Structures are given as structure tokens and as C-alpha cells.
Amino acid sequence: MRRFSFLFLVGCCLFRISAAGQLPLLGIARVSIRVTNLGQARAFYSRIAGFEEASDARNRDGSVAAAYFKINDRQFLKIIPGLDANQARPMVGFAILTDQIAGLRRMLIARGLHPSKIRRDADGSRGFTLTNLPGQDLDFLEFVQYGPKALADRTRGQYLSAHRLSANLEHVGIIATNFDTAYDFYVKTLGFHEIWRRLTADRSRPVIDHIQMPGPSGDFIELSNIGESTSLTRRRAGVAAHLAFTVPDINAVVMEVHKLEPTMHLQAPRYGLDNRWNFNLFDPDDTRVEFMQVADPTRPAPAVVVTPADFGKAASAIGIFAGQSDVGHPALPGSASFNPAQNQYLVSGAGANMWGSKDEFHYVWRRIPGDFSLTATVHFPKQEPPSHRKAAIMARQSLAGDAPYADAVVHGSGLTELQFREAAGDLTHAIRFPIDAPVRIRLERKAGWFTMYAAREGQPLQELGAYALKMSDPIYLGLAVCSHNPATIETAVFSNVSLKVIPGSSRKNAAVRHASAP
């Protein structure tokens, strides 16, 4: 009897320890996605995303049951044929890696969960599954452990294409049908912790929530508070139940995709409320594949943000400017962000040129009547050989590619000009100035005259030249960047930007010099 009591007490202690400890989780191991057409999915994930197919599992009839695409030595995508046309959500589940599969299973049982038995998966890993996940539109959550028979160990260092758009899967998006229930499952039961939350504009409920798993990986899930919607479309489900990868350079991703698929319509990278750039692709079944770059590592996002009332609308304000546009339909989309602490605009754009009878560039703009003076310090953060990439302060009649305009422009080569087009569709002309590579420029409009000022480092602004150009109010005024190469995105930084409205005045005896330059 005493021996039984002793064993009973030991068992109770072990039960409490296993229930209370931190779960041994090592990060996201794989994501399982069902697809309609395996060939099309293979083309997208292999040729465009750059992930090599490391292996596949076969049915008894020889058909493919699942294809495994390798992200890195830890992470895989599992692509499963057979998506039903009536099924809105292609993502069926994801797996978390552990190095203590049996112990983890005991811990989850101790926390009141009902995991399946441990079994060997088709990829050779050992693991178990949780189903009937509370508050989520997801078929299963797996926990797996690698070993000598696992695909991860057998292919270590292999199938890692140099053309991968990313080498790290950071988070998985999950549809929450009951947000509070799903949140409690991950936070209270599995020991995840919240790192970022976005609320509705009226602060009444969360929109999305980033919840990070315990352990060394930093991987997390993104709960989308969609609710119990019976009319969930494939597109909406694919946006919410998504894959998210980190990248060091979002523009490099855009350019690589364009190089592979020149006719694919690409959305511009967007500056998110979490202080990160994001760029989205969609696979053939509308699962969103998101690429993210931290915009400013020194400025972490606040833990909780409120969705602006105009969030998602076409022309959200950027600092003193009302919106941004790709003018002239450049092949690659541009983007822009504003750092209010530094009064600094980061503008990225592609485009063949701002010249000739038609322009292609990215433009941050506002509409303004009357006379003005707009001044900025300009530099190109990428130090490259001289080129004709352009950064400009531009006044423009409209957002049409052939619209009349005047700009104070600095080339990557240091060339400094006042460019102008007098009428829609006309050729562009320029006044070239002897100053080379100024750091601060100004474009001023007074009584119909557009004047350029510029200065080298540490020197005062000097008037360089002017041209009389007729444009009807209101006009567009802002910051422009053109890469001068349709297949490349260039970035310019505009800092200490200052806009002044000038009372009506007249201008006399202005010297005008003409020259032509590309």
C-alpha cells in the first residue's frame, strides 16, 4: 500500500511538472497546402518562389500524394493535390518542430488536449496531430521531430536554390472563427505570447494578432479575426490563411519576380502598420505568399496599433503628401514611406526614364494651387557606378505619363538639371547646370516661372536657372524617382523636406538656358 501511495505521488508530481513547463518548440517545420493542379503549383513554388522540390510521396497507384518543397534545412512546404472547387481554404494545417516528441505529447495530454498517437510521416519524421482545433478554421496542427530517416536530415545542405526569394518562413496566417477561443488555445494552453495586435478604428475588437511561440525560433502565427463566415471566398480565405517570409530587400524580390514573369501584374510593396514593407504574390489557388522586410530596425513597431479610418484606401497620406502613384505604367511597381521622427521620405521607383514624350517613375504627391517652394536634401543610399537614375522634386499638371511638368532633378551620375515639358505629349527639354551632385535642391514656382536652386554639402542654396511654364491650378507637386532601367528599382532618400506657400508675385528678367540630356 505504501509503495502504491509513493508511486501515485510521484506520478502526480510528474503530471504537474509536465503540465506546467514550457513546451519544447523549435519553430515552424512545414505548412500543408492543398492545390487544384499540382503542375501549376509546382511551377509557382519552384520556378517563381524558387523552392526546390526535395521529394514526393506516392499513392499506391503511383500518383503523387504530396510534394515537399524545401525552404531551408528546417522548413518545408507540403503541397497536396486534390483541392475541391467548393473548398474556400487551401491551407489545411501546419507543423511545429520539437526535439522531444514523446515528452511534448505527454505535456499536451497533461494540459487537457487529445493528441493522436506518434507515427512516422511520409517524409520520415515522427510526430502526432491535434484536430478539432478550438476557434480556428484549420484541419490540423502537427508536432514533428526530425531524425536520420526524416527528409530534413537526409537532404541537409541540399535542394537550397540560390534563386529562392526567401530562406525563412517567419509566420503562418490562421483564420480565427472565434478569436478569443483561438487566442486562449495558443496563449494559455500552448504558452505562446502576443507580440503585436491591430485593432479596428473604433478599438472595439482585434483585426489581426501576432502570437509568438516559445523557444528560440521567433516564429509566430497571425490570427485573422474573420469570425464564423459561411460565405468565405477563396480569395479572402487565401489572404488570411497565408505564408509569410522574411527578406533583406523587398525591391530585389519584386525585380526577381518581374524578371521571371514579365507579364505578371505586380502590386507595389506596401508599408504596413507593423513598420514593415510587405509584398504579396498569390499562388494558382489564391493562397497569399507574403514577403516582408523590416523598414527600420531601430524603430520597432508599437505593440498595439489602431487601424486608420482610411486604411486600405487608394491614397493614404504620406507625411505632407496626399498619396503615391506609379506614373506612366512602369514595369515594376514603386513604393514610398515616411519617417516622421527624421522628416525623411524613402521613395523607390522603376521606369525607363523621365524624358522624351512619356515618363515612367514613382511619385509621392499632393495637389496644390498657386506659388510654392519645395526643398529637400537628396541622396541615393546605394553607392553604385554613375548612372542616369533620377531623383527629383517635380511639379506636374496630371498623373498622365505624357503630362506637362517641371522638375529639379539630380542624376545618379551627379548631373543637375531643370527639366520641363510644355504640353502633353511634347518632348522634354532641360537646362543643365555646372554644379555637380548637389545634396540639397529646391523647386520654386512664382508667377508661372519654375526655378531650380541647389547646393553642395555645407553651402547655401543658389539659384541656378528658371523657365516659364503654363500649368493650370491645382497642380501635382512632390518627390519622384526613376531607375532609368525598366527592370530595376532604385531608391532615393529625401530628408529635411520643407514646403512653403509663396504669396502671389511677379518675376522679371529671368535668364533661361537650354540644353538637351537624357
Image (cartoon, rainbow, N blue to C red):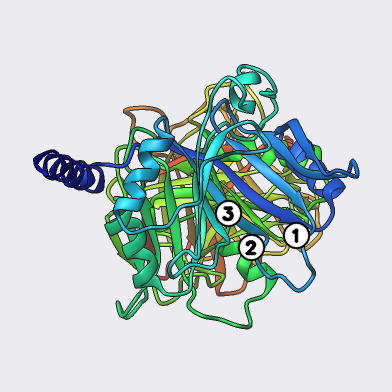
Question: If the image is split into quadrants, where does the C terminus sit?
Answer: top right
**Mark 3 element type:** strand
Question: Residue 220 or 132: which is nearer the viewer?
Answer: 132
Label 2 near label 1: C-beta < 8 Å? yes
Crowding at mark 1 (Cα within 10 Å: few <14, some 14-19, many 20+): many
**Mark 1 element type:** loop
Residue 406 in percent (x, y) is at 61, 54
- Taking the image as shown, residue 50 lies to the left or right of residue 317, namely right
Task: Please tell me which of labels 1 and 2 falls first in the chain.
Answer: 2
Q: CA distance from mark 1 to mark 2?
A: 8 Å
- Taking the image as shown, residue 196 lies to the left or right of residue 126, namely left
Q: Nearer the viewer, mark 2 or mark 3?
A: 3
Crowding at mark 3 (Cα within 10 Å: few <14, some 14-19, many 20+): many
**Which residue position holds label 1?**
285
Task: Please tell me which of labels 3 and 1 falls first in the chain.
Answer: 3
Question: Residue 187 or 279: which is nearer the viewer?
Answer: 187
